[in-house]
Image (tube, rainbow, N blue to C red):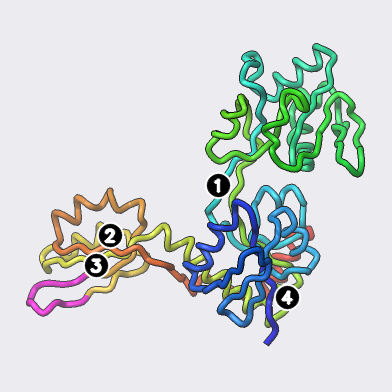
């Protein structure tokens, strides 16, 4: 049996990724400092990589499937198939400036102030491509500098035409760069605490990011690999969907059964079973977690003996289309 290569991220994405894989039913054997953890599925080979690298390695076919951040997919501009939003590790990529700059509250303010003073604006970031796209979409940038790219400065090269806006590649601790080595930063934040501790204020959100599952396009055209990739997708989607649902069991008298069923937002048609006592039924169904508080008063008035479970997974198997025609169709749509 051919194995698929699954890249999982290190860093802040690592622990929630391991938790999700384990909730999906995988058993992962981790050794300290090992970048090749073992897994209980013989059809999968795990590799731990930096999330920045995973989109590129998946695009190039060095890995068949991977978990990374949406931010890094945008930054690398990798040509991959996005299979699933995993809905964890939500972060924002923000533009932030020193808090004492009371008069600067947007990118437009920042660009105008530095242009008025005849100073080059220095921005520190790990996201050079995302930052360039963001800056060049700003109407003030377009008015001042047209279509010129900001100058990007890294240890290996320096390129770009607009010497009035400089992007310095950061290798971490980006929030520590102002005011000596940068005027502003474009950096990820989850709670804003690190920016606050470094006397910075976010003035605009560049993009929002979350963990995503991506796949190599050629791997999806390979029948054997595609089947295993969709096994992984099915189990992980089950976790994503399971976190949004509640599994409830409720006992109801037959005179209230119809009214109760009318008020239950079931995943599919609920299971109804007669109890040993004549005239009583058990209703077993899966509901949206966020609707539970809305329907609780109705349940209290119509039913008895409510039991609630948090499902580990909800697998909607009929939604998992793995056909070759669908893969080819999506690939052609991407090429247009």
Depth check, mark 1 against mark 3: the one in front is: 1
Percent of width and height locating residue 281: 16, 72
Residue 202 visible from this viewpoint: no
Of the pair 126 and 256, the residue shown nearer to us: 126
Ranked by sequence position, the earlier of labels 3 and 2 is 3
Is label 2 in a helix, a strand or a loop? loop
Calculate the distance from the C-alpha at mark 1 to the C-alpha at mark 4: 31 Å
Quickly name the residue at label 4: 221
Tell me where residue 178 sits by quadrant: top right
Residue position marked by numbered label 2 in the rendering:
264
Residue 72 percent location from the top left of the image = 70, 50
Q: Residues within 10 Å of mark 1 (few under 14, many from 20)?
A: some
Question: Residue 155 in magenta?
Answer: no
Which mark is nearer the camera, 4 or 2? Answer: 4
Count of numbered marks:
4
Along the horizontal axis of the image, is 107 left or right of 232? right
Q: Which residues are magenta?
A: 273-282
At mark 4, the secondary structure is helix
Cβ–Cβ under 8 Å for marks 3 and 4: no
Left or right, 314 with reference to 199: left
* Closer to the eye: label 3 or 4: 3
Q: Give the residue pinned by disc 1.
A: 90
Circle nearer the viewer, 2 or 1? 1
Instruction: Name the quarter where the C terminus is drawn.
Output: bottom right
Residue at position x 80%, y 65% in the image: 60
């Amino acid at each position: 049996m051919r194995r698929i290569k699954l890249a999982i991220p290190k860093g802040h994405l690592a622990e929630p990724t391991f938790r999700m894989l384990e909730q999906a039913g995988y058993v992962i054997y981790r050794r300290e400092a090992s970048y090749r953890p073992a897994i209980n599925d013989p059809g999968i080979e795990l590799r731990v990589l930096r999330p920045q690298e995973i989109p590129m390695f998946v695009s190039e076919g060095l890995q068949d499937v991977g978990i990374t951040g949406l931010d890094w997919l945008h930054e690398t501009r990798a040509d991959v198939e996005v299979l699933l939003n995993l809905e964890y590790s939500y972060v924002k990529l923000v533009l932030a400036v020193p808090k004492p700059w009371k008069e600067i509250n947007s990118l437009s303010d920042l660009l105008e102030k530095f242009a008025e003073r005849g100073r080059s604006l220095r921005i520190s970031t790990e996201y050079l491509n995302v930052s360039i796209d963001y800056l060049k979409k700003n109407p003030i940038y377009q008015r001042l500098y047209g279509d010129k790219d900001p100058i990007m400065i890294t240890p290996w090269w320096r390129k770009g035409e607009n010497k009035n806006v400089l992007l310095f590649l950061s290798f971490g601790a980006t929030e520590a760069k102002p005011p000596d080595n940068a005027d502003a930063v474009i950096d990820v934040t989850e709670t804003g605490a690190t920016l606050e501790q470094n006397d910075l204020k976010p003035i605009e959100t560049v993009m929002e990011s979350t963990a995503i599952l991506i796949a190599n396009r050629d791997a999806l055209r390979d029948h054997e690999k595609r089947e295993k990739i969709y096994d992984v997708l099915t189990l992980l989607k089950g976790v994503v969907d399971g976190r949004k649902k509640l599994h409830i069991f409720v006992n109801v008298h037959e005179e209230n059964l119809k009214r109760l069923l009318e008020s239950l937002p079931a995943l599919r048609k609920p299971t109804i079973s007669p109890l040993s006592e004549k005239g009583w039924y058990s209703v077993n169904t899966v509901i949206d977690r966020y609707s539970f508080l809305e329907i609780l008063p109705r349940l209290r008035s119509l039913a008895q003996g409510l039991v609630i479970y948090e499902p580990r997974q909800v697998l909607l198997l009929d939604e998992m289309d793995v056909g070759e025609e669908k893969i080819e169709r999506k690939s052609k749509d991407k090429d247009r």
